[in-house]
Structure formats: structure tokens, C-alpha cells
Image (cartoon, rainbow, N blue to C red):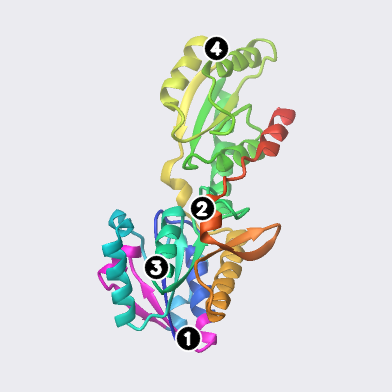
């Protein structure tokens, strides 16, 4: 039986993490379980950065972006010696179970601790939506809204100056943020890891739009880590009728107050995590599948390929 539960956030921050922290804390306290907030992820665990949480400690955080617990990366946590040290500390602090909010790397740490006797549950907290097993991750919807808002503004100025805006969005080698943004904004071209990158095709399509269709602006949405968007924008200026301009949205996508969707998702996932730990379960990650919140073995989630969203790419091409 769980008497004392720890909670930490790891990896990149995402809007909605605080909503998850709040839900885990309040549901656990309602079940008579003590809650310990662990600052700065696995690093904070090793360095014993603990704080006992009361109900009031998580008041007024539902609408705040980022994470009140902070986050830090600890590559050394892959080493068994460091994992054993973490188990020793948790046992000394009488922390029976752990909720870990983060991405794939965070899940692997949670799985390792579970195998060593500390039941852990993972919550998918990342704006990239790059975790297999769940339709949506905590923070993705908010980041999408940020992308759409900024691309809409870029379209206003692009149409005034006969420009092609090349907009790089995040994704960590997952194209969801790009293709959802492209459909939502009516972009002319989207480039993702799933679609592949064909520079000549992009240039030819923009030539056609400028000369044959006589469009006075164009938007190209591209996932990060695919190409140098500044270089692509220069080539667009050189070889098409458009004046190319590159915009990297960067870490602005991580910030901001979480959307109602992300607040709801985080709250439901947090509740499910506590319920499963109370049932003595561990080594699971909480997923949203067909609008249902379910627990999936972490090993199964990590081994699955991420849904490629081919249907969304087909939809995009039919809408252009």
C-alpha cells in the first residue's frame, strides 16, 4: 500500500505539467497519501531536493505554464549505480512510489526504478507529441495554439509584402506540431520527417504558386532538425517570385498558460496515475487513446512506432 508518493518533472517543460502536479497531489492527499515534490527531476532526486506538499502548495498553479518543480537532465541516470543510489534515497525517505512527468527518457528512468522495486507511473509531458501509445501528450495542444497564433500573424505581413514565410516549429523528429499547424493555418507547404524533404519540389511548387496561381504570399511550415530554414528562405528568394523570410518560433512554443484541453488532459492523467499506484501497479505510462485515459506498460509504449499521421498529410494535400 502506498503511504508516501513522490512526483517529479523531467526533460523539457510543457504547459500543463503544473495541472498534472496539482491533480496528482490533491488526489493522493484525498486518499490519505503523503506527497513529496522533487525539484529538478532525477537530478533533484539524487541530490535530495524534496518538499512535502500540502493541498495549498498546489493552489493557483493550474493556469501557469512551465513546472513549479523545475526540470533538469541527468544523463548519468542511465547508469545502474546511479539508479541504485536513487532507490536507496527513496527507501530512506520512505517514498513508496513515484509519478514521473516527461518524455521517453523520463519513462526509461521510471521503468528502471520500477524494476528495482519502486513502483513508478509515467505521464506524457512534452509539446512534441512524440510519445508512442498516446494520441496526445500534455502540452501539445497549447504549443499548437501558440504556433497557429504566430503563423496567422506572419501571414498578415507576408501577404502585404509578397513574401514566403518559412516557419520552423518544434517536434523532436515528430511532425505532428508541423502538420497540425499547417492544416490549421492553411499553409501552402508542410515538411515533416514523415513527408521527407525535397528542396527542388518546394521551389517548383512555389514557382507555380507565384507565376501560375498569382498568389501574393505563401507559408511553408517545417519541422525542426530537417534543414537550415535561413538557407532555404534565401533559395526561395533567388529562384521564385517570392521574397523568402525564415522564422524560427523556438522556445516561445513551450511557454504560456496551458489551454483548457491540456488542463483537462493533465488532470485526468494525474488522477489515473494515482489510482493505479494505489492498486499496486507500476511500470506503466498513462495514455489518451480514443478519448479514454488508460495505462499502458512503458516497455510496450517505448517499443511502438509513433503513429505517422499519414491521414493528416493526405488531408493537407487535398486542402492545398
For label 3, count other residues whose C-alpha is less than 10 Å away and answer few (under 14), some (14-19) or many (20+): many
Distance (Cα) linking label 3 and label 1: 20 Å
Query: Residue at (59%, 72%) from the top-left corner?
Result: 272
Secondary structure of the residue carrying numbered label 4: loop
C-beta proximity under 8 Å, tags 2 and 4: no
Residue 161: tell me if it is visible.
no
Q: In the displayed structure, does residue 178 sit left or right of residue 209? A: left
Per the rendering, the mark at residue 113 is: 3
The Cα–Cα distance between marks 1 and 2, rounded to whole angstroms, is 29 Å
**Front label number (4 vs 1):** 1
The numbered disc on residue 57 is: none
Residue at numbered disc 1 = 33
First in sequence, mark 3 or 4: give its number.
Answer: 3
Identify the residue at image location x=58%, y=42%: 176
Question: Along the polypeptide, which appears first: circle 1 or circle 2?
Answer: 1
Quarter of the image where the C terminus is located: top right
Residue toward you, 128 or 286: 286
Pair 1/2: label in front: 2
Q: Is residue 45 above or below residue 140?
A: below
Q: Which residue is mark 4?
A: 240
Nearer to me, 185 or 223 = 223
Q: Which residues are magenta?
A: 28-53
> Sequence order check: which comes first, mark 4 or mark 1?
1
Q: Nearer the viewer, residue 79 or 39?
A: 79
Pointer 2 with pointer 3, Cβ within 8 A: no
Q: Position of residue 10 (x, y in %)?
A: 39, 60
Measuring from the top left, give residue 277's x and y in whole percent: 52, 77
Residue 56, compared with residue 248, is above or below; it is below
- Disc 3 secondary structure class: helix
Q: Which mark is residue 302?
A: 2
- Give yes or no for residue 32 being in the magenta stretch: yes
Amino acid at each position: 500500500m502506498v503511504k508516501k508518493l513522490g512526483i517529479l518533472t523531467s526533460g523539457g517543460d510543457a504547459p500543463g505539467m503544473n495541472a498534472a502536479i496539482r491533480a496528482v497531489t490533491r488526489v493522493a492527499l484525498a486518499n490519505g497519501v503523503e506527497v513529496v515534490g522533487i525539484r529538478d527531476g532525477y537530478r533533484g532526486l539524487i541530490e535530495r531536493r524534496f518538499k512535502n506538499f500540502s493541498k495549498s502548495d498546489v493552489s493557483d498553479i493550474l493556469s501557469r505554464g512551465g513546472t513549479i518543480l523545475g526540470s533538469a537532465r541527468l544523463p548519468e541516470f542511465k547508469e545502474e549505480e546511479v539508479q541504485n543510489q536513487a532507490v536507496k534515497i527513496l527507501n530512506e525517505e520512505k517514498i513508496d512510489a513515484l509519478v514521473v512527468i516527461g518524455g521517453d527518457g523520463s519513462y526509461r528512468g521510471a521503468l528502471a526504478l520500477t524494476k528495482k522495486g519502486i513502483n513508478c507511473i509515467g505521464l506524457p509531458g512534452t509539446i512534441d507529441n512524440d510519445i508512442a501509445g498516446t494520441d496526445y501528450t500534455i502540452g501539445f495542444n497549447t504549443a499548437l495554439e501558440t504556433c497557429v497564433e504566430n503563423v496567422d500573424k506572419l501571414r498578415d505581413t507576408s501577404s502585404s509584402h509578397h513574401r514566403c514565410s518559412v516557419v520552423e516549429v518544434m517536434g523532436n523528429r515528430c511532425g505532428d506540431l508541423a502538420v497540425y499547424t499547417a492544416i490549421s493555418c492553411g499553409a501552402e507547404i508542410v515538411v515533416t520527417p514523415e513527408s521527407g524533404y525535397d528542396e527542388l519540389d518546394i521551389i517548383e511548387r512555389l514557382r507555380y504558386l507565384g507565376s501560375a496561381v498569382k498568389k501574393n504570399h505563401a507559408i511553408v511550415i517545417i519541422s525542426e532538425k530537417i534543414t537550415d530554414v535561413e538557407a532555404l528562405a534565401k533559395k526561395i528568394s533567388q529562384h521564385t517570385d517570392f521574397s523568402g523570410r525564415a522564422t524560427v518560433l523556438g522556445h516561445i512554443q513551450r511557454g504560456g498558460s496551458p489551454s483548457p484541453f491540456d488542463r483537462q488532459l493533465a488532470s485526468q492523467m494525474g488522477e489515473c496515475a494515482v489510482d493505479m499506484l494505489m492498486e499496486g501497479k507500476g511500470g506503466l505510462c498513462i495514455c489518451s487513446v480514443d478519448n479514454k485515459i488508460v495505462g499502458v506498460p512503458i516497455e510496450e509504449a517505448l517499443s511502438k512506432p509513433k503513429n505517422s499521421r499519414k491521414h493528416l498529410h493526405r488531408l493537407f494535400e487535398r486542402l492545398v
